[in-house]
Amino acid sequence: KEFNIQLNRIMKPKQRKTIILSYDWEEPMRNYFYNFSASCKSFNFLLTVPKELKIEPRVFKVEAETGTKTDETLSSATEYVGNKKIFKWARNDLLADEAYQFNW
């Protein structure tokens, strides 16, 4: 997946803006890859699925030059709300060109 987001106003240097990207899809490969093109103060990944769906979410930091993956799953959390399962993973102070892959 690749998303190109166009803001309705140009951001000034050092200006902050929160963007929430929410979408529904069917993903036969069950993965999502995100490469940060700019530094990011705070990033939150939430995956919401039906409670009865058997998934084992994994998060990997991917080195762009080598493709080497480091497991970052330990810093995640899963909670149950009603009939839904919510997988949460967050990071602060990400640098430009850091990349992460989310598998479920």
Image: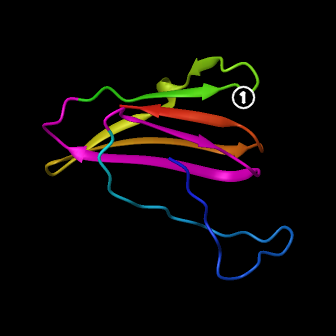
Q: The residue under label 1 is which amino acid type?
A: Ala
Q: Does 54 sit left or right of 14 as displayed?
A: left
Q: Residue furthest right?
A: 13
Which quadrant holds residue 27?
top left
Q: Does 81 sit left or right of 46 as displayed?
A: left
Q: How is the image coloured?
A: rainbow
- The image position of residue 48, as x and y in percent, is 30, 48
The magenta span reads 28-54
Q: Is residue 37 magenta?
A: yes
* Vertical position of residue 58 compared to residue 80: above or below: above
Q: Quadrant of the C terminus?
A: top left
Which residue lies at the image location 36% right of the left edge and 34% below the top edge?
A: 30
Mark 1 crowdedness (10 Å alpha carbons): few <14, some 14-19, many ≥20: few
Which residue lies at the image location 13% right of the left edge and 49% below the top edge?
A: 83
Q: Which residue is mark 1?
A: 64
Which quadrant holds residue 51?
top left
* Vertical position of residue 99 compared to residue 83: above or below: above
Which residue lies at the image location 56% right of the left edge and 56% below the top edge?
A: 3
